[in-house]
Amino acid sequence: MKTNRNIAIDGDSGSGKSTVGKLLAEKLGFVFIDSGLFYRAATLVIIKNNAEAEKEKWYKLVEESKIEFENGIISINGKKTTLGELRSKEVDNLVSPVSTIPEIRNKITEILRRIAFKRDTVMVGRDIGSVVLKDAFLKIYLTATVEERANRRFKELIKEGVNTTFDEVLNNLRTRDLIDSTRETSPLKIPEDSYVIDTTGLSIDGVVNKILQFYEGKEYALRNGPCSSKSTI
Ligand code: DC
């Protein structure tokens, strides 16, 4: 049986996971999966059904929808979603509470595992190394200061044409950090066997190259037996 080469990248909101993960997947020829987009798709289902205020209905609505992934695009009940709608302010404001629902997490986890089972992926998220792909070939955890993360997300949103301010993005990130790290199911935490990289002040290429070095180190160890232990940067 072929050895699994999935790479799990976890980290705080705006730590650069998606940009780094996408580039890394391109370099390695792996499928890039942004797991946050699946939670955003579940949130979109709730918003489209006008059920924002009816928490008790959330899981049933998500369970009854078909969330699928093909060629880098997520579809809901056969209809393709766009990044614009998945990253809209409405979704931003509801996605953290939606992702605290254990049944919704289980459903998304199942979808993600099915994708990674057949293909080598670079999967980014919050609980990929700790829950979704516990046996990932390589686990990376990215951090950065909240101000740096807000600055990156703000620039991204402006580029995408979203009408917002830096303070709004900063406050939204702070709130989400708090919810994500204190929720009962799969709180954001650093898996023991992951490599931690602080990306504050680092270029995207710099981070990608560091991960590639870890990846090559793992490949080498697999072929020649382990020669290096876990490290923190
Ligand atoms: O990465 P992002 O900002 O697009 O993620 C949106 C939300 O989804 C975030 O607030 C937390 C949640 N999420 C999660 O709980 N687990 C994941 N693996 C990915 C995202």
Image (cartoon, rainbow, N blue to C red):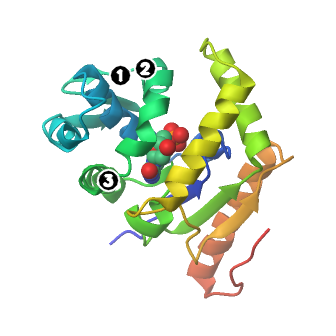
| Pointers 3 and 2 in contact (C-beta within 8 Å) | no
Indicate whether 51 appears above or below 107. Answer: above
Instruction: Give the position of the N terminus as an image quadrant.
Output: bottom left
Other residues around mark 1 within 10 Å, as few (<14) / some (14–19) / many (≥20):
some
* Point 50% across, 60% down: residue: 182
Kind of residue sitting beneath label 1: Thr
Residue depth check, mark 3 versus mark 1: number of the one nearer the observer:
3
Q: Position of residue 163 (x, y in %)?
A: 62, 12
- Residue 85: image tag: 2
Farthest residue to the front: give it: 53
Give the camera-side residue of 27 and 59. Answer: 59
> Does label 3 point to a residue whose CB lies under 8 Å from ligand 1?
yes
Alpha carbon separation for disc pair 3 and 2: 21 Å
Q: State whether residue 66 is above or below residue 29.
A: above
Kindly tell me whether residue 89 is visible in this rendering.
yes
Residue denoted by label 1: 81
> Mark 2: which amino acid?
Glu
Q: Which label lies toward us, 1 or 2? A: 2
Query: What amino acid is labelled 3 in the image?
Result: Arg
| Mark 3 / mark 2, whichever is N-terminal | 2
Q: Is residue 79 left or right of residue 190?
A: left
Q: Residues within 10 Å of mark 3 (few under 14, many from 20)?
A: many
* Residue holding disc 3: 105
